[in-house]
Amino acid sequence: MLDAVIIGDANETLLSLPDGHFDLLVCNDFLEHIVDPVGFLSKACTKLIPGGHFLCSLPNFRYLENLFGILVRKDFRYMDSGILDYSHLRFFTARSMKRLFREQGMEVEVFRGINTVKGVMGFFLKLLLWPLNSSDMLHPQFVVLARRRDA
């Protein structure tokens, strides 16, 4: 159940929220759309109670289909949706996502690929990528659940 809905600029709205108040903040498919995701996440962490959680999903720039376009087609073409969405201002890989949260004083508790390539194609791609330790390339998005470390 919602107690309130606040509409407005994310950075301005965040400043109006009380510090140390929330046990969970959710920002799905959001951080890649803002100019300063590091600054936003840093401010958002102050709004969490000690041990509070931040949940988000982020697109994976290292997704195989995306890299195929860059490395094989030699093209970086923005799209109406997906990883190369016109409105994306920032791009992340699995490693940079984890670093983003660690550097803001958070511990990543859950890090899971979603919308993964499945079926026969997924099986063969896993076999192909296994020696490279590149299974992250099978996930167009990751879900991150991170906890404020000062608990």
Image (cartoon, rainbow, N blue to C red):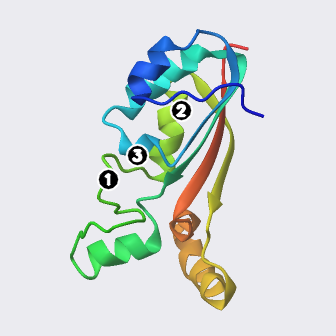
Mark seen at residue 87: 1
Asked which secondary structure carries label 2, the reply is: helix
Q: Quadrant of the N terminus?
A: top right
- Cα–Cα span, label 3 and label 2: 14 Å
The quadrant where residue 45 appears: top right
Q: Amino acid at mark 2?
A: Phe
- Which percent across, then down, holds residue 87? 32, 53
Residue at 40%, 33% (x, y): give it: 37
- For this orientation, the residue located farthest to the top is 19
Which mark is in front, 2 or 1?
1
Q: Is residue 149 above or below residue 132?
A: above
Determine which residue is flagged by label 3: 32
Residue at 28%, 72% (x, y): give it: 70
Residue at 60%, 26% (x, y): give it: 106
Mark seen at residue 101: 2
Asked which secondary structure carries label 3, the reply is: helix
Name the foreground residue: 142 vs 129. Answer: 142
Q: Is residue 55 above or below residue 29?
A: above
Q: Quadrant of the C terminus?
A: top right
Q: Is residue 116 above or below residue 45?
A: below
- Which percent across, then down, holds residue 30? 47, 43
* Disc nearer the start of the sequence (3/1): 3
Q: Amino acid at mark 3?
A: Glu
Q: Characterize the local packing of mark 3: few (<14), some (14-19) or many (20 or more) Cα atoms within 10 angstroms.
A: many
* Disc nearer the start of the sequence (2/1): 1
